[in-house]
Image (cartoon, helix red, strand yellow):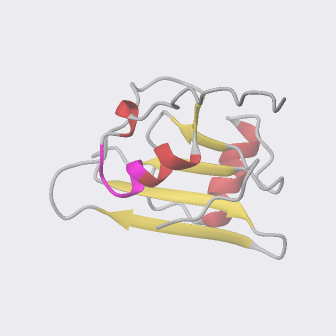
Amino acid sequence: MIAVPAGVRVLVATKPVDFRRGADSLAALAREELQRDPFSGVIIVFRSKRADRLKILTWDGSGLVLYWKRLEQNAFRWPPISDGVMRLSASQLAALVDGLDWSRLHARDAPRPEAAS
């Protein structure tokens, strides 16, 4: 389980990347092709061509962190392949990393509190 601090943006690079890339190469890709600053605390998720692997890149304040996961069976549920990025919520990221269908998660409208009289 990956804990995402409140207010942190989670972005998915929708186009598959070469999974031989390391942290520095993915940071350069984020900066040059995705127009995102990988050192701003944003979480960027990259997908493999076979859709069974993902890499997550973020800056934790003291260094780049690279998280890598491969599913042994099945594949991750990814957004359609296109150029650019897509934003996910923290709960959608958790579902994606667990291999679940994150697209089925939606925020529930909370009832408004009534004013005390």
How many numbered badges does the structure rendering display?
0
Where on the picture, by quarter, is residue 10?
top right
User: Along the horizontal axis of the image, is 114 left or right of 68?
Assistant: right
User: Along the horizontal axis of the image, is 40 left or right of 21?
Assistant: right
Q: Where is residue 36 in the image (x, y as percent from the top left)?
A: 76, 40
Q: Does the magenta stretch include residue 104?
A: no
Q: Is residue 1 above or below residue 11?
A: below
User: Along the horizontal axis of the image, is 53 left or right of 107?
Assistant: left
Q: What stretch is highlighted in magenta?
A: 95-100
Question: Closest to the observer: 21 or 112?
Answer: 112
User: Along the horizontal axis of the image, is 79 left or right of 7?
Assistant: left
Q: Where is residue 4 in the image (x, y as percent from the top left)?
A: 63, 58
Q: Position of residue 9 (x, y in %)?
A: 70, 44
Residue appearing at x 45%, y 51% in the figure: 18
**Quadrant of the rendering where the C terminus is positioned:** top right
Question: Closest to the observer: 110 or 19?
Answer: 110
Where on the picture, by quarter, is residue 73?
bottom left
Residue appearing at x 83%, y 76% in the figure: 62
Residue appearing at x 83%, y 53% in the figure: 40
Residue appearing at x 69%, y 45% in the figure: 30
Q: Where is residue 84 in the image (x, y as percent from the top left)?
A: 60, 27
- As drawn, which residue projects farthest toward the left? 73
Q: Is residue 109 above or below residue 3?
A: above
- As drawn, which residue projects farthest toward the front? 117
